[in-house]
């Protein structure tokens, strides 16, 4: 999952030319500076290498920073950890709430681009998770149906064999 997120992040955040990122409210023009992109990539790379205990401490530090100052940068640092961090600290539902609460007007271009990518990634994972659950349920139902049909076939075969045994004289 982490590899799926890093490719689009690198592509968007390392871009020097203006580009458009689709959002539900329409296209948002994004011009990303390499310095900002490097900051977010470095931040993410450091996070994914931390052991679980340090990750949990980092999460608490980020949470406290956000409580003290709910500016876009602290919000996004916390959301990045919750959205794309290792499983021990991942909470995509909370990350999505943080991302939706981001004050776009106060955020710089790279923060907006990253927020958009994270939000889209979370929403796509939610959609695909729902689709997977739906397909698993259908598979379970299909397996149950196959088992029932096999049971009925076995019963019919047994009945047929019993009939054939009665009809053949000894």
Image: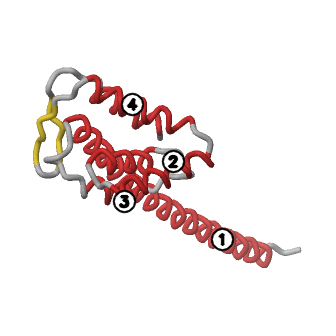
Q: Label 1: how many residues lie within 10 Å, few (<14), some (14-19) or many (20+)?
A: few
Q: Which mark is residue 67?
A: 3
Q: Label 3: how many residues lie within 10 Å, few (<14), some (14-19) or many (20+)?
A: few
| Secondary element type, mark 4 | helix
Q: Which mark is residue 100?
A: none
Q: Determine which residue is flagged by label 2.
A: 58
| Residue plotted at (54% across, 64% down) | 140
Q: Determine which residue is flagged by label 1.
A: 151
Give residue 5's position: percent from left, percent from top: 40, 37
Q: Nearer the viewer, residue 96 or 159?
A: 96
Q: Mark 4 or mark 2: name the one nearer the start of the chain.
A: 4
| Residue plotted at (26% across, 48% down) | 72
Give residue 79's position: percent from left, percent from top: 37, 50
The label nearer to you, 4 versus 2, is 2
The residue at the far right in this view is 170
Give residue 36's position: percent from left, percent from top: 28, 29
In space, the residues marked 4 and 3 are separated at their CA atoms by: 24 Å
Q: Determine which residue is flagged by label 4.
A: 41
The label nearer to you, 4 versus 3, is 3
């Amino acid at each position: 999952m982490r590899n799926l997120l890093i490719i689009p992040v690198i592509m968007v955040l390392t871009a020097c030319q203006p580009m458009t990122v689709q959002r539900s409210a329409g296209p948002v023009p994004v011009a990303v500076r390499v310095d900002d992109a490097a900051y977010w990539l470095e931040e993410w790379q450091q996070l994914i290498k931390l052991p679980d205990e340090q990750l949990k401490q980092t999460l608490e530090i980020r949470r406290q920073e956000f409580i003290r100052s709910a500016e876009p940068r602290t919000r996004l640092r916390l959301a990045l950890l919750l959205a794309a961090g290792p499983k021990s600290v991942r909470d995509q539902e909370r990350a999505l709430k943080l991302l939706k609460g981001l004050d776009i007007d106060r955020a710089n271009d790279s923060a907006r681009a990253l927020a958009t990518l994270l939000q889209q990634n979370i929403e796509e994972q939610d959609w695909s998770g729902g689709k997977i659950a739906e397909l698993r349920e259908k598979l379970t139902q299909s397996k149950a149906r196959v088992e029932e049909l096999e049971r009925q076939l076995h019963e019919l075969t047994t009945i047929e064999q019993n009939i054939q045994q009665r009809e053949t004289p000894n």
